Amino acid sequence: MTPTTPTTREPDPIELDKPRVSIRKPEHRFDTQGEMPDGERVERAMKSFVRDFGRTAAVYMESCIHCGMCAEACHFYEVTKDPKYTPIWKLEPFKQAYKREYGPFAAVYRALNLKPKVTVERLQEWQHLIYDSCTVCGRCSLMCPMGIDIASLVSQARRGMFNAGLVPHELWAVSERARREGSPLGATPKVFRDRLEWLADDHEIEIPLDKPAADVLCTMSSIEIMKYPDSVVATARIMRHVGADWTFRLDGYEATNFGLLSGNTAGQKELTMKLIDAAVACGAKVLILPECGHAYTALRWMGANVYGKPLPFRVLHIAEFLAEQARAGKLRLRKLGKSATFHDPCQVVRRGGAIEAPREVLQALGVELHEMYPTKGTNWCCGGGGGVVAIHRADELRHKVFKIKMEQIEATGAELPVTTCANCRQTFDDGQAHFKWDKTMHSLLELVADNLVEGKQ
Amino acid sequence: MSLLDFARGPALQWSIVIFLVGVLWRLLGVLLLRTRKDLSEPRKAAAWKGLRLIALRSWPRKEFLGGTAFGEVMGYTFHLGFLLALFCFVPHVLFFADVARGLLGTDLSSLLGFGWPTLPNSIVTLLSAISIAALVAVLIHRLVSPVKRLISNFDDYFSWLVTTAPLVTGMAAFAHLGGWPYERLLAVHILSAELLLAWFPFGKLMHAFTIFVARGSTGMIFERKGASL
């Protein structure tokens, strides 16, 4: 194993405009950040793991019966049959540390050394399991007969790993870059403003920016700004179509939150607060999150807890907003007359609860929906969530996982695969190129924008 | 003091004390931890409805059934067999009634208002045998399944042992097996049950309590979000 120590100035870790370079047999490695003694790394990992340890997480730690059933729900286990990908095993050093340092019988475990101390080598070994081979999709949490939300524990373990400087380099770098520049992929305020001007000119559409007051604050993900700028235009066209009083704001436009994915709690808070402050500043009644899964988790479900009080505005995923508009009869859409299948983004659907909204929008588009099997809450993850798509050394494993999605989609016989997460879409684009597949993933948002019936009817 | 006296006397008292204190300590050790109020706007206000996960998760969704059916069926088999043998075998019921009379100073039936149901000895024998067979099957599965073998530790095997032992010793005592005097067989049986009680708070057997809290907590958190249960 070869540890690498990255510096703070790094090249763009995700080269979105260039083909991905995949190493066929990458050397097994782990990454470390910062200089500190091994003992301190372990100490930091464990302290931050248990720092926010409340009742629920502790009950989870006390409840596992080692039945191994969670393996059956994990896509990484499904395609490899390698037992190390059993979801609960991904937490083993943290379970060990919990019993020894924190649980009700910790004193007994320590006195009799029933659970040995976790070593830095063990944590380094586990980096691959906690990051490269877990998308935090939470499918295992639906399987566990004890009802343990394993995905939430993995997120907690990631916080420990981040504080110990044991994060895969690419995730660490994008998280740092987001903190430094306001965007993980270089969509700085200047880049965003330039892009908006260029898109507004090119598409002859007004894109309001920095309005001092607006009912609706729209946000985008960096993947959309840098790779799928049509989504920005689609957002503007839809807002104009429904007659919304809306704006983008340079002080809060970037919904991507790599702080959440890497385990950087301070970074996560900083990025979340930017959005909240921007919405408060313009007196927004609604903040609309883009087609991005973890952005939804970060603000919709964690935002108020970061803020310390209930948010003074509603938070909606763009698919929820579209469904509301469709229900209110404000969306006039051409009927597509095609068959489509919907890929459920885990953080929006399974863990986020916006299960029916995207389907309502598809219905409004007049598509014949062919559901995948399994679908909705138990749909398979694309394999790129949880930051995995950013980790190059995980490419080979991720591509294996992607085959599940290809088979699922092919089995539906639908003409259009559709999703509502740019990260899933990016994973599909990469998978399509890798396997030379003839199916292209479509954005629900862009599909709606492309089929708006403009003008009075 | 004979072995049977020891089993019925101090061993029983101590195992009950260890069980009660240990279970309380472990449960309170986690239940008394703080929990933060979730300030996000709920999608569904009646989060308590998520408590239905306690019942729902008793059987896997059909999407997951394929790979887990063996574990589920065997698990239910030995749990049910064990519980029925424990609570519906006539000598056990008489024993519990004795203990209850000693502790509460009244008959269990007058307290409950009805007589405790019992099963014929032949049925209990059959259930015990089926339970033991299922327990052996799950042990073999734990040893041959790469997933279960990897994630297993001392607790898994020792908990298996202390669960299986009372069934085996109970059947041996009932059938007067091994050429030992009945009193000694009975004493060994009672001691094996006391070992189960004493181990209970320290290992995975605690899931008998934590399962409700874990399922209930997850159910309420997920229901609040409208997420899939």
Image (cartoon, coloured by chain):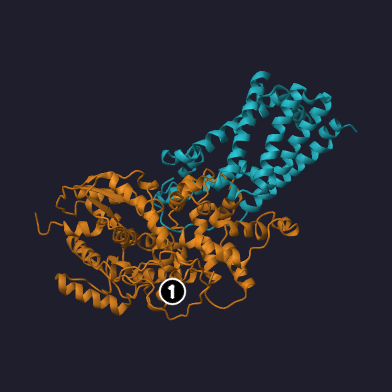
Chain colours: A orange, B cyan
- Work out which quarter of the rendered image holds the C terminus of chain A and state it: bottom left
**Residue appearing at x 57%, y 31% in the figure:** B77
Residue nearest the viewer, comparing A56 with A372: A372
Residue at screen point 38% across, 53% down:
A381
Residue located farthest toward the front when viewing the structure as drawn: A25
**Is there any visible trace of residue A346 in the rendered image?**
no
The residue under label 1 is: A173
* Amino acid on which the number 1 mark rests in the picture: Ala
Q: Measured along the vertical axis of the image, is residue B217 above or below residue A154?
A: above
Q: In the displayed structure, would residue B214 be above or below residue A270?
A: above
Q: Is residue A6 visible?
A: yes
Residue A254 screen position, x and y as percent: 34, 70
Give the crowd class for mark 1: few <14, some 14-19, many >=20 residues within 10 Å.
many
Residue B74 falls in image quadrant: top right
Q: Nearer the viewer, residue A78 or A110?
A: A78
Determine whether, in the image, residue A206 is placed left or right of residue A133.
Answer: left
> Is residue B88 shown left or right of residue A377?
right
Q: Position of residue B130 (x, y in %)?
A: 62, 27
